[in-house]
Image (spheres, grey):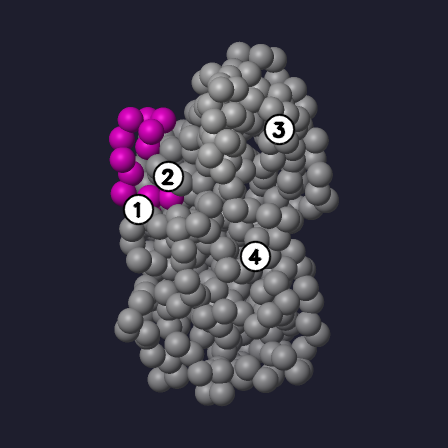
Amino acid sequence: MNHRTTTDRKVVKPTPAELMEDTGTGLDYGTRPDRMVGDLTATDRFYLRSHAPTPEVDAATWTLRVEGKGVRESISYTYDDLWQRYPLVSLVRTIECAGNRRVLFGAEVGRTFAGTQWGRGAIGTAEWTGVRLRDLLEPAGIAPGACEVMAEGLDEIRARRPMPLAKALADDTLVALAMNGEVLPADHGFPARLVVSGWLGAASIKWLGRIEVAEDPIHVPWNTEDYVLIGPDFPADAPARGPAITTLPVASLVELPWPALLRPAPQIVRGRAFAGENRIAAVQYRIDDDPWQDALITSPVTPGVWVRWQFRWHPEPGEHTIRVRATDDQGNTQPDSTPWNELGYLHQSVLAHPVCVEPPAATARSEANV
C-alpha cells in the first residue's frame, strides 16, 4: 500500500468563501464565477470534485501500472520514469463536471436532483504538463483487439472510467504531473492524473494508480449507474441505465454573482463559454427583452478550452435580466431548456441571470459611507 487518507479534512487546500462555493459535501467546492480572472483558473480557486477524501500518496513508492488483455505485457512506471524518460508536453484544457449547474437545472424543472448541488462553478481551465497517455501505452504493446482503456484512481473507492482506445491515443489525452506550472497539488491528483480533453470531468481520473487496456467493453458504476443519462429521451443499453456521458455540450456563464448588484454606470460584463471537444464560434447576449447582440470574444478559440467574452452595458436603475447564448463550430446553440434526465446532468439552458441596478441616490450614499 502506498497511500493513506488524511483524517482532519476531506480536502487539503483552503476553500475560503471569498473564492469557493461550498456544496455541503465536504469534498466538492465550485469556483465563484466573480472570482475567475484571466484565461487560466488559478490553482487556489480551481474547483474540487472528488468521490472520497484526498489520499496522501508517497511519490517515492508510487507506481503506475499498465496492464490488461489489450496489451502484450504489463509494465510499471515510477514517478521519476514519467519525469525523466518521456517527452513532456503542456496543454491548456478546460475541465467541467457533468453535473455543473445542477441547482439551476432543478430550478428550471421544479425539483431537486440528487447529487452534488453545483451552482455555476464546477468548471476550470489550467495549463497541464505531463506525458501523453499513448507514450505510456505503446511500450506495453497494444494488442490488435484492444478497444477500451480505463484509468483507475488511488482514492478510497478507486474511481475509474473507461474510454475508447482512439480517445486514449489522442494527442491531447495527457497523464498530467503539473498544473499551472507547479507540481500537481494533492487535491488535484498528485502525483499523476488524467486529462481527457473535452470530456466530462469524471473521465480525468485523479491519483492514477492503474491503467487497464481491454479487448472488450468495460462496465463499471461510473458508466452504467452514474455519469449516464437516464430518462425518456435516453434509452437504456444494459447493463447501463442510459447512454454514458462523454463530451460536453455548449454552455456559458456570466462572471457576476447570482443575483448581481450593479451601479447605474457604464459596465463591462464578462463571461466564459465552453463547448467540450468543439470550438466556440459565437456568443450573443440579450438584456431584458431587447434583441440579441454579438458579444466580443477576447481569447483564443481552441477545441477543449473555454473562451472569454465581454460586452459593454450602461444599465438603467431597476431589475434586469441578462441572457447569454453560445454557439459552437458544429452549429449547436444553447437551448432554452435542457432535456430532463434523472441525475440532472449536462444542463446547458440559456440562463436568466438576475441583476439589480441601484438608483443613483443609493449609489451616492454608498460612496459617501466608504
N-terminal-most mark, 2 or 3: 2
In this picture, residue 350 sits left or right of residue 25: right
Instruction: Specify the quadrant of the image occupied by residue 134.
Output: bottom right
| Residue at (29% x, 51% y) in the render | 24
Label ID, residue 102: 2
Q: Is any part of residue 142 visible from this angle?
A: no
Question: Up-down: is 193 above or below 38?
Answer: below
In this picture, residue 156 sits left or right of residue 268: left
Q: Which residue is mark 4?
A: 42
Q: Residue furthest bottom?
A: 60
N-terminal-most mark, 4 or 2: 4
Q: Which residue is mark 3?
A: 267
- Check residue 116 for magenta coloring: yes
Q: Secondary structure at mark 4?
A: loop
**Disc 4 to disc 3, how far (Cα)?**
24 Å
N-terminal-most mark, 2 or 1: 2
Of 196 and 40, nearer the camera is 40
Q: Is any part of residue 18 visible from this angle?
A: yes
* Proximity of marks 4 and 3: CB atoms separated by less than 8 Å: no
Q: Amino acid at mark 3?
A: Gln
Give the x, y percent position of residue 177.
57, 71
**Disc 2 to disc 3, how far (Cα)?**
29 Å
Give the x, y percent position of residue 79.
55, 82
**Disc 1 to disc 3, how far (Cα)?**
36 Å
Which residues make up the magenta segment? 106-118
* Proximity of marks 1 and 3: CB atoms separated by less than 8 Å: no
* Proximity of marks 2 and 1: CB atoms separated by less than 8 Å: yes
**Disc 1 to disc 4, how far (Cα)?**
26 Å
Q: Amino acid at mark 2?
A: Arg
Q: Which residue is mark 1?
A: 115
